[in-house]
Amino acid sequence: MEEPLRQLDSQRAEKEVRLASHALWSDIHGVCILGLSGSLEKANAGSTAAIAESLVSNCLAGYTR
């Protein structure tokens, strides 16, 4: 994940790119675990795919500001 983030903002420090990559991976992992466990369905939160797509879109929008 680091290389695509690096391409989005080539001026960003390597440490920040690595941190953003780990944060995004952790977020996606969490959504997937919640989806697999049925917790998203119980909370009527929407599909795992829709939540993951929203998470990535919002994360990247903030990253590129």
Image (cartoon, grey):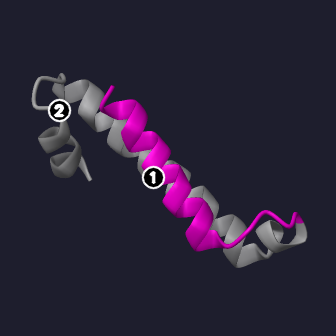
Q: Is residue 19 left or right of residue 40?
A: left
Closer to the chain start, of discs 1 and 2, is 2
- The residue to which callout 2 is attached is 9
Query: Where's residue 43, x and y in %?
Result: 88, 63
Q: Label 2: how many residues lie within 10 Å, few (<14), some (14-19) or many (20+)?
A: few
Asked if residue 44 lies in the magenta stretch, the reply is: yes
44 over 24 or under it: above or below: below
Residue 22 lies in what quarter of the image?
A: top left
- The residue to which callout 1 is attached is 56
Q: Is residue 47 left or right of residue 32?
A: right
Element class at badge 2: loop
Q: Label 1: how many residues lie within 10 Å, few (<14), some (14-19) or many (20+)?
A: some
Q: How far apart in space, not on screen, are marks 1 and 2 (Cα)?
A: 16 Å
The three-letter code of the residue at mark 1 reads Val
Asked if residue 18 lies in the magenta stretch, the reply is: no
Q: Is residue 23 visible?
A: no
Q: Nearer the viewer, residue 8 or 19?
A: 8
Residue 33 lies in what quarter of the image?
A: bottom right
The three-letter code of the residue at mark 2 reads Asp
Magenta region: which residues?
A: 43-65
Query: Where's residue 58, x and y in %?
Result: 48, 43
Query: Where's residue 42, x and y in %?
Result: 89, 70
